Image (cartoon, grey):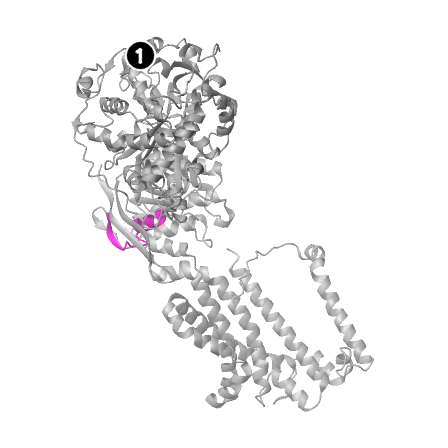
Amino acid sequence: MTTLVDVQNIEKDFPLAGGGNYLALKGIDLEIRQGEFISLIGHSGCGKSTLLNMIAGLDLPTDGVVLLDGESIKRPGPDRMVVFQNYSLLPWLTVRQNVALAVDEVMPDLGRAERDAIIDEHLEMVGLGQAGAKLPAQLSGGMRQRVSIARALSIKPKLLLLDEPFGALDALTRGNLQEKLMQICNEHELTAVMVTHDVDEAVLLSDRIVMLTNGPGSKIGGILEVDIPRPRQRLTVVHHPSYYSLRSEIIYFLNRQKRVKQWQAKTHKVLARHGLEKVNLDLGILPLAACAPLAVAEAKGFFSKHGLDEVHLVRETSWRGVVDGLLDQTLDAAMMPSGMPTWMTAGGHGGDPLPIVTALTLSRNGNEVTLAKRLADQGVTTVEAYRSWLGSHEREPHRIGIVHPASMHNLLLRYWLAANGIDPDKDVHLQTLPPAQMLADLKDGSIDGYCIGEPWNYRAATTGHGVPIVGDLEIWPGHPGKVLGAREDWALAYPNTHIALTKALLEACRYCADPAHWSEMSELLSDRRYLGIKADLIRFSGQPGETGPFAPHGEPHHLFFGAGLNRPSRTEHLWILTQMARWAEIPFPRNYVEILERVCSVSVFSTAARELGLEDVSYQRQGIELFDGRAFNPDDPIGYLNDVKVHRDFSVAEIPLGLPRPLSV
Amino acid sequence: MVPTPQRRPGKSSSPLGWLLRQRGNWLPPVLGIGGFLVLWQVLFNLGILKLPGPISLFTEERTRSLILDPFFDNGGLDKGLFWQTLASLGRVAQGYLLAAAIGISVGITVGLKQSINRAFDPLFQFLRMVAPLAWVPIALVVFQQNQPAAIFVIFITAVWPILINTAEGVRQIPQDYRNVALVLQMSSRRFFTKVLIPSALPYIFTGLRISIGLAWLAIIAAEIVMPGTVGIGFFIWDAYQQNYVGEIVLGVIWIGAIGLILDRLMLWIQKRMSSGQ
């Protein structure tokens, strides 16, 4: 496909009333191909309408150029017709005269009859053939917008520009007009750019969705390809498997933008007190049972006991939020899946490698694999049954939800599937979804099952939407679940704070490990600040002799504290590195010793444990052996990788980390 | 201050039925005016008010003949009220048309070009505040003759509301309409006829309507101080000089009625013109 519009390195600033300039857009690059439908989405004031106006030529960029067919756009023209949000029909002209105004102006060479035919054709096209003699004031909003679309299309523009075209319409009219517009665009192979606020509208109509970050200096934050085949129908498109992941991707982006804006609006002074470099911390959590140590540390005053007076728990909805929070430093530290520190250190998030340290393992176990009820109804309740069921249902896509590529869920699930003869990439597709999204997807059948931590397995089992088929006690009992993670430069800038934080959480872990506290913890976590679900759905371990859906697989037996449980283990992180390399999430780092040395902050843990008088928990765990009996030799990780049967094409590469240096404060 | 343009669609129906159904609209004003006249007569009869009562307009010989025959013409200044009014209206028409032509064209220029607006707005605002009467001596000095001086006073009084409202109307053309014209690459002539004039029309008519009242006010003021002219203004002044109080009252009523008719006429035209919007 040829490029129709080429936006090259656009910058736009506006003079402010009080002097100075407001930088609206900065460094915008975008190629729009012939026949493509593009949506621009972002928060109010992000400059999406400004960008549209610059393509229209109604506004000129301060810097950079917009090319149409290779020629620079200097002024507006009828080849880039705009459909304005408020219709912009001339109220003193009838519907027909409004369209005629455009046709007469743009096609003066045609005869009257030809022009009349064009006008009639386009009024018919939008279903307003009968309304030609009416004045705009006599029409509803939806009809007016149809006139506006007819006027725009009647002059055969190369490019149709729509500025929130359906924003002011009621939902029903909006839906009808969206379908009409899609139909017209398909039939006439139009190229269109649309500004919208509406996430569903963007997914429904677009080939690509351009997401703009907040101003000042808005940039393109991401471009999503919508792979839903055309022709699309408003009511059926929601069943396409990509629909909800695209939708949640956009919503995640918009929420992230909002949070960054709120964060920027507050002042961020580093408060140093009690000999600690920083006592005001924003800690990221996810609504999972494993966030108990952080919730307990907050509720039971462990943070303030260790001098951290102003700790604020920031509830993220996905692990990606935690990654982004650490990247843009809106979070000081966070609970994270145990694979995340090495994954980010190795650059798994796609940017420059960002060294992350972990001084504490917060929890172990707590995960299950749940399959949907519809599979259990066909007798698929074991991995063997699932394998043969997959064999007989090859044509359908099979998706299994995971929460993050660096999560233990992903690695254990892959290990378990591969060991049971199911290739986790070829036979099924593992899809990253926010935890809270999983149950909904399981219900509507867009995923076969998921691997996740509590309370989502117990919840699916109690509501009858899913059946747990394997627990982590059957895969790797005592595997690391969630860890405390922080940027290395943060930890170096605030060493005493890091130790105090580790101490507070280690004490909280000890509190959480006592079964006498579990009902209290369930009650605490049921609060909306944490999980926001009923307390009896939040369980940390089963009762002896209990029967139920978990009984055959072992209960979600959370371990929060104990000998060798909390100390960061280089062997475990090495196992994680080999698994992530095995599935090509990251290359296997040639300098893995350096990475493990820097990720595992054993000295911080030891200091914290010693100061709490808990030296006995520092004992080193022994080797790693999973359910299939394969031993993991930490002295030869590459040999291990070469030895496993199922793996992707993994590579070995040096990860350049640079020298450890503290954050400049 | 610019009044918001009125946009009310007219209604049509059979006259008698309409009159009956609309009595809530016309009955109160009839009662109000009637009550006022009765009060006036009573106050006169009690001797509290020196002004002759409304009935005396018919009982008194001079005023009765003026009322009954507005069309007599005895030459010179001794003419019926119709001729007096016509002479005044003629002057108003000339001055007002001139004011409309200049006011609208200058108003459009000022409305389109911000720089011109900045240059002249203080001047316009300043001149606008000068009362019609103050222009009379200047007009007499400049024109040396009563007739052109009177027309000038009408013009200078009536031009400001037209000019300022037109300029505002042009400035208020929604950016959307301008964008439509820009995207379609409309020629300036077509922009003028298809977008600018229709869009600014309600504002222009608001200015025209304010100005017709002002023009009528100004002609009376101008004629009063311009002796020897035929016109309703000088008619009153003449009656005052000769102490015909009844004639003064009659003249005043006549002026008010004509002013009201002019205003309603403009309102009617305005409604007709903007019924499409």
Location of residue A536 with respect to B251 vertically, above or below? above
Asked whether residue B154 appears in the rendered view, the answer is: yes
Q: Position of residue A272 (x, y in %)?
A: 38, 46
- Left or right, A525 with respect to A323, comes to right
Location of residue A450 with respect to A508 vertically, above or below? above
Task: Report helix, strand or loop for mark 1.
Answer: loop
- Left or right, A144 with respect to A496, comes to right
Tally of numbered discs: 1
Camera-side residue of A60 and B206: A60
Asked whether residue B94 appears in the rendered view, the answer is: no
Q: Quadrant of residue A387 in the image?
A: top left
Q: Position of residue A304 (x, y in %)?
A: 44, 38
- Magenta span has A61? yes
x 40%, y 12%: residue: A553
x 34%, y 61%: residue: B188
| Magenta extent | A47-67
Q: Residues within 10 Å of mark 1 (few under 14, many from 20)?
A: some
Q: Position of residue A584 (x, y in %)?
A: 23, 25
x 50%, y 31%: residue: A527
Dot 1 amino acid type: Phe
Camera-side residue of A645 and A430: A645
Q: Position of residue A284 (x, y in %)?
A: 39, 35
- The residue lying furthest to the right in this view is B46
Label 1 resides on the chain identified as A
- Magenta span has A113? no
Q: Quadrant of residue A607 in the image?
A: top left
Name the residue carrying label 1: A627
x 25%, y 54%: residue: A63
Location of residue B82 with respect to A405 vertically, above or below? below
